[in-house]
Amino acid sequence: MTFSIVACDLKEQAWGVAVASKFPAVGAVVPWAQAQVGAVATQSFANTSFGPRGLELMRSGLPADEVLMRLLDNDPERELRQVGLVDAKGKAVSFTGAGCFDWAGGVTGKGYAIQGNILKSARVVPAIEKKFLSTKGDLATRLHAALLAADRAGGDRRGRQSAAIYVVKPQGGYGGCTDRWIDYRVDDHPDPVARLGELLEMHDLYFGKSPESERVTLKGKNLQRMQSILRELGYLKSAPTSLFDAPTQKAFTAFIGNENFEERADPSAGWVDRPVLKYILKKFEK
């Protein structure tokens, strides 16, 4: 009832899982990951203990293949399970029990494990692998591209309902306090994988980082347009001056805070990242 990819990028030091299913809130069940430890996808009558137990075993230093054997050992319903693991060194394994519903199966390669059950056809898993290997970008981008390719190749033969992506890397979380870099779920939607892509675009807009060359200093026409927006929205009370003066700085600071773009602008220095400026002008300019 699910298709997933578990993968890592050792250069990026990132581990993650992308998954979709005709099942509500699949992200609450399947994906598990910890930076510099590994990642696990547990599905098909999922034994959710495989997630925390798998990470604990990999954290102790056991490789993915041995962890898989330990997880399945003494599991009376092992032939109904489907599991994919990638460890800290990029070793990957996938298991599909004999009792999983057709089409069911998986494939592994260096740094990735792909698996699915109740799929439209045997073409779905190869579609994931091909797209993952050919896509450029960070791990989250590649995982979502692979998931979308599988979905468009037929995906779950029963239809669509939910999707999720979970990617970790050291200090990848907000403010660098946790490893949870990407954590988005679409729990019930007619086209969840596409919607997941929209959420990733939003994440990049709010939390992406542009090089200094992409910072736009607010002056000239850009400043005038920003002041008009601030005036229209009620942040700037005085008439625009075409100068980044104290009232403009105060108004811009309040606006950036309200729109949650603190990571992409510096009101004290009067600059904003170009992608964010483009978004603001498109959304608010009349």
Image (spheres, rainbow, N blue to C red):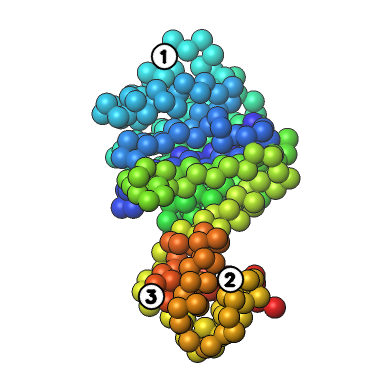
Q: Amino acid at mark 1?
A: Asp
Residue behind mark 2: 235
Q: Determine the residue positioned at 54% across, 14% down.
A: 77
For residue 32, above or below residue 13? above
Using the numbered discs, state the Cα–Cα distance from disc 1 to disc 3 in whole angstroms: 60 Å
For residue 24, above or below residue 242? above
Q: Position of residue 27 (x, y in %)?
A: 56, 36
- Of mark 1 and mark 3, the one earlier in the sequence is 1
Using the numbered discs, state the Cα–Cα distance from disc 2 to disc 3 in whole angstroms: 18 Å
Q: Nearer the viewer, mark 1 or mark 3?
A: 3
Residue behind mark 1: 73
On screen, residue 282 versus residue 241, left or right, reads right
On screen, residue 22 versus residue 266, left or right, reads right
Q: Position of residue 24 (x, y in %)?
A: 66, 33
Instruction: Check if mark 1's residue and mark 2's residue have beta carbons within 8 Å.
Output: no
- Of mark 2 and mark 3, the one earlier in the sequence is 2
Element class at badge 2: loop
Q: Amino acid at mark 3?
A: Ala
Instruction: Check if mark 1's residue and mark 3's residue have beta carbons within 8 Å.
Output: no
Q: Position of residue 169 (x, y in %)?
A: 36, 46
Residue behind mark 3: 269
Q: Determine the residue positioned at 45% across, 62% down.
A: 262
Element class at badge 3: loop
Quadrant, the N terminus? top right
- Of mark 1 and mark 2, the one earlier in the sequence is 1
Element class at badge 1: loop
Q: Determine the residue positioned at 37% across, 37% down.
A: 34
The extreme left residue here reads 61
Circle 3 packing at 10 Å, graded few (<14), some (14-19), many (20+), is few
Which circle marks residue 104 in the picture?
none
